[in-house]
Image: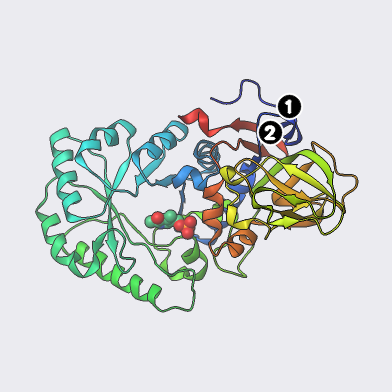
Amino acid sequence: MAFAEPLPEPISASLRRPETGGTLTIDVAAIAANWRTLARRTRTAECAAVVKANAYGLGVEAVTSKLDGAGCKTFFVADLAEARRVRACARGAVIYVLGGFSPDIGPGYIDVGARPVINSTTELAEWDAFVAANNWRGGAAIHVDTGMNRLGIPYDRAVKDFETIAKLPGFTIEGVFTHFAMADEPRHSITQEQHDRFTACCDALQKAGHDIPMRHCANSAAIVSHPGTHEDLVRAGIMLYGYNPISGGQELSPVMSLKAGIVRCENIAKGSGVSYGHTWCAGQDSRIATISIGYADGLARQLSGRVQFLLHGKPVRQIGRICMDMCMLDITDFPEAQTGDAVTIIGQDGQARMDARDYAALLDTIPYEILCAVGKRVPRVYLQNGTVVKEACDIDFL
Ligand SMILES: *Cc1c(COP(=O)(O)O)cnc(C)c1O
């Protein structure tokens, strides 16, 4: 369910809405542009989209619809519930579920028309029994673990395990893939080693008489740092959303901005404390703004007093502890600031820009986690060439 009436104006209209805190604005045209950039770069390899975790927090419906329209044919999700949401927006797409297969959710695969990723020999046998019992022709992909040590059939057991596969009837292998552990460290030799192990496994499988229409390994980092691993398909995630995991690498089109409105401006006297614990005290008479975004919206409490946002195109210091729904700013140097003004947490404001990388660095994490952490209650507003095309709130999907 979208909000009853699409808003005629872009973001500023959303910021006026008193019942919401922050607003996450997503430029779907930029996501499509990033996909095209990658698809050009990978040439003959198909560029698939990884839209797990609600498309890294940005909203799986809007992202899938846009990429489906742009020509993306294959989508990867974490579980069947996500696959269902993708299917609703991309009727003809191929959808792979990375989390694997279990018989109790088998009928769901038929229902959605999704393909499981087979992560173990147990799953392989279960899937084989399931397709036979249901006369189901949908394929599956085999995941080989070449060194990530997370999921998949271990590469050094694979050849033996593949003998078991050879005995199984009626089973269509649509693809074999692996996942790199360190593709974001271009100079590390493990990626090449993983790719060698992968190639040996695929060759062994083919020798055993299995057709493998698709081989794939590359995530975003490998797309840029290891072009020799593109094979038949690449699985692009974070780069679609505007972040290059290789530092200093090619810039992509920025996709998202996160803003919150000022809900109160007040003067306080020198010596007054602000927020829980009074961890910040005014060293002079000061003016303080309260903005409607807090840790429940994804603004990590560990950032308290260590971060700056943008107001009127300039950096503004966040002060005191970040609360659940709000936090405070020192706006002493912004005499013209008033209630209703937009504060940029992520995105461009005039010449200045704040980026998920800035927060990731402070929190010792990666932009992925910053994106995924944006709170469920933060409305997602989708823009295309500066115009709102859709609004959604994750409450809609409950
Ligand atoms: C998440 C994921 C990807 C995408 O990774 P990015 O670094 O976001 O491009 C690709 N493959 C698998 C198996 C994944 O789990």
Badge 2, how many Cα within 10 Å: few under 14, some, many 20+?
A: some
Question: Tag 1, which secondary structure?
Answer: loop
In the rendered image, residue 359, in percent from the top left (x then y), is placed at: 62, 59
Q: Is residue 100 above or below residue 61?
A: below
Q: Is residue 321 visible?
A: no
User: In screen coordinates, is 337 left or right of 343?
Assistant: right
Q: Are marks 1 and 2 in contact (CB under 8 Å)?
A: yes
> Which mark is first along the chain, 2 or 1?
1
Image quadrant of ligand 1 equals bottom left
Q: Quadrant of residue 73?
A: top left
Q: Is residue 3 above or below residue 167?
A: above
User: Circle 1 sits on which residue?
Assistant: 8
The quarter of the picture where the C terminus appears is: top left
In the rendered image, residue 89, in percent from the top left (x then y), is placed at: 47, 33
Q: Amino acid at mark 2?
A: Val
Instruction: Tell me the CA gap for discs 1 and 2.
Output: 7 Å
Q: Disc number at residue 388?
A: 2
